[in-house]
Image: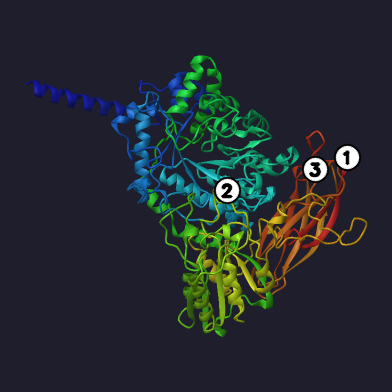
Amino acid sequence: MKTIAVILLSSLTASTLQAQQRSLYHPGWIDFNKNGRRDLYEDRSQPMDRRVEDLLARMNLAEKTCQMATLYGYGRVLKDEMPTAAWKQEVWKDGIANIDEALNSLPYNKRAQTKFSYPFSRHAEAINSLQKWFVEETRLGIPVDFTNEGIHGLCHDRATSLPAPISIGSTWNRQLVRAAGQTVGREAKALGYTNIYVPILDPARDPRWGRTVECYGEDPFLVAELGKQMTLGVQGEGVAATLKHFAVYSVPKGGRDGDARTDPHVAPRELHQLYLYPFERVIKEAQPMGVMSSYNDWDGVPVTGSSYFLTELLRQQYGFKGYVVSDSRAVEYLFEKHRVAADFKDATRQAVEAGLNVWTNFDPPAAYIENIRALVQEGALSETTVDDRVRDVLRVKFRLGLFDEPYVKDPKAADKLVHTAQADSLSLQLNREALVLLKNEGSLLPLDRSKMRSILVTGPLAETTSYAVSRYGPSNNPLVSVLDGIRAATGKDITVLHEQGCTVTSPGWPDTELVPTALTRGEADSIQRAVAAAAQADVIVAVLGENEKTVGESLSRTSLDLPGRQQQLLEALYATGKPVVLVLINGQPLTVNWAQRYVPAILEAWFPGNWGGKAIAETLFGDYNPGGKLPITFPRTTGQIEYNFPFKPGSHAGQPSSGPNGSGKSMVNGSLYPFGYGLSYTTFAYSNLAISPEVQAPRGSVTVSVDITNTGNRKGDEVVQLYLKDLLSSVITYESQLRGFERVSLLPGEKKTVTFTLRPDDLALLDRNRNKVVEPGEFEVLIGSSSEDIRLRKKFAISNRQ
């Protein structure tokens, strides 16, 4: 009888709990705090700020501090794929700000492999289950913000793959980048992610830096324009975009990465003009909901402990309304590396007081959360400050609609929304438009199929595809190598031969760049097999460069030459007398001086996505006409670094052999390929440059128009570039600055008018007191095909009197 009573009581309790859970959900509102009435924060008809304040007033210190930390997902910190009873004993029993990379099946982390990542609908359902636990099992039911990476496409099992950001930068195509952002946002939303870490707004000013591959380029204007479109694309789908890495992150001393993530040598004026410019523009013009604080310092103060960066600049000057999340170990570095804090607890206080909202690291969040609680209880940290930080987090969650619809509304729809045929088509087009033709002597390209019987595809990157899979992008997608693409493009009439020739690196590399070693017998034989195969071919396609083990995060280089034995392979192939086409797969500029001098055709492909091999093959055979432009300068040697655009007058000048300061030529001058450079299979003419008005007030705008005509016999794309030169100023300005660009597609003989608008901000400088002003005086507009290939020039004036 007693047993029956216990069973009945258990059944009754279960039924009561189920009834309570069902009673949370009402038409038009959710009873998050489970009190049976619609409170202000649960009322979607109320203004957002009132809802935020109402919820904040209901929170205790434990609940507030839980909204200030990240919980990394399964296989990182979480040991459970789904909630368990033990979660009631964890710190997140009182909620959590966000869960990062939840059930996404990271490609390089076997512990993170999960059955919930695919099919896509299963992941959406799993995210709903995780969200349901926080809504139903915590006191106030505050939903979780599910974050994820997205710079190469959404970092999720079988999501749509995008080429590396340096490739995206080479497209110079705002509309295409906007569409890429929409794809990332749409797929994130369908899968249950609500916040994506994208775009990277760091200008890559030192090409030795390993993460150059993850940046849009070196120029702040180009980075800002493309970053704005990516942000608008993502957030237009109802998902937050979190910018990274704020700030001055991309110029560690000597280009070093890994543990050397500090000490950028950047003057105050350049801090604002180069490194903060993209963040200021994107924050003001696209209103992102997130910013990631970096783990480096500037001028002796760690950014994540700096109220100047996290409060004065971000919030007071730029108007940022989202929340700031730290990069991994950024808080810990305050005491571990920078030594400005006594311990983790003191570092926590400094970061929170500076303006950090959410701590992130690959560690459990309890220690950080307990730090804040202890600091408040000891009186070392004001709870008012904690309220300010939590308020920003809650505001983003309300803005995302998580208090109105915390769940993926239709999980089954994910199977039709993620990685569609249309998304694959977009990915392929990005790969096409990112290709940059660096050299085409004698019009070797495009290759004429009718004149070829055999082709040799060689090089260590001809058959491999590992470079197309990033830690920050999708995995488990079908991949097309360059060899695959060429085989598909040639059909049965052309024999495609293949020999690897060499590996990307050699034994002992990179020390062999300091003290060269002789080829081993195996290396010599491998090169000789490629040479023997070349004797049977009409043309050689050598696919050389870098892979994911030689460039990327924590993979900076001291030399930018082709690594390993690749230069020996290239020279041996050239010596056969057969025409050689060099295809570069790489993540940073390479000093391919020998190739530029001797190899007739060079195609820059960067790190393409999964369709890269197809796009490259189409371009080699003329089915697609390359129109990409370099978003970064190629130096001739690392001895020139820093050598980038924009630059101050005289800073790129050579050493004259004559004249008043002449003492002989003792250095290499000029770039290998300048910023904005790229060739085409057709030609373009520029004409009719017009400026209106030719005299304008400091607060007025100026319109510039120019006609572009395709003067060749192929359809092609030209990136029309507008550079601006301030002819006389109170402080030194750059030789010229990119202030407009437009990618236009033209049929043979077709002419289009391209129009630009120069705003006051485009003309502004920081005066001697570092105030942003537009000074009266003359400006020169330079229109051209690259920063050095200027076709037309014309002046206008800014005057206080008109």
Q: Nearer the viewer, residue 795 or 618?
A: 618
Give how far across and how far down residue 233 sits, in percent. 55, 47
First along the sequence among labels 2 and 1? 2
Q: Secondary structure at mark 2?
A: helix
The quadrant of the picture occupied by the N terminus is: top left
Residue 767 shows in the view: yes
The kind of residue tagged 3 is: Gly
Residue at the image position 57 percent from the left and 48 percent from the top: 230
Give how far across and how far down residue 549 sits, in percent. 51, 56
Residue at the image position 51 percent from the left and 56 percent from the top: 548
First along the sequence among labels 3 and 1? 3
The kind of residue tagged 2 is: Met
* Residue 750, above or below 370: below
Q: Are marks 3 and 1 in contact (CB under 8 Å)?
A: no
Q: Secondary structure at mark 1?
A: loop
Mark 3 Cα-neighbour bin, 10 Å: few <14, some 14–19, many ≥20 = few
**Residue furthest right as drawn:** 660
- Which residue is denoted by mark 3 in the rendering? 700
Q: Secondary structure at mark 3?
A: loop
Mark 1 Cα-neighbour bin, 10 Å: few <14, some 14–19, many ≥20 = few
The kind of residue tagged 1 is: Asn
Q: With 222 as the anchor, is 14 left or right in this view?
A: left
- Per the model, the C-alpha gap separating discs 3 and 1 is 11 Å
- Residue 531 - label: none
- State the image quarter where residue 421 is shown: bottom left
- Which residue is denoted by mark 1 in the rendering? 800
Q: Are marks 2 and 1 in contact (CB under 8 Å)?
A: no
Q: Nearer the viewer, residue 436 or 652?
A: 652
- Which residue is denoted by mark 2 in the rendering? 230
- Per the model, the C-alpha gap separating discs 2 and 1 is 37 Å
* Residue 27, above or below 519: above
Give how far across and how far down residue 786 sits, in percent. 73, 60
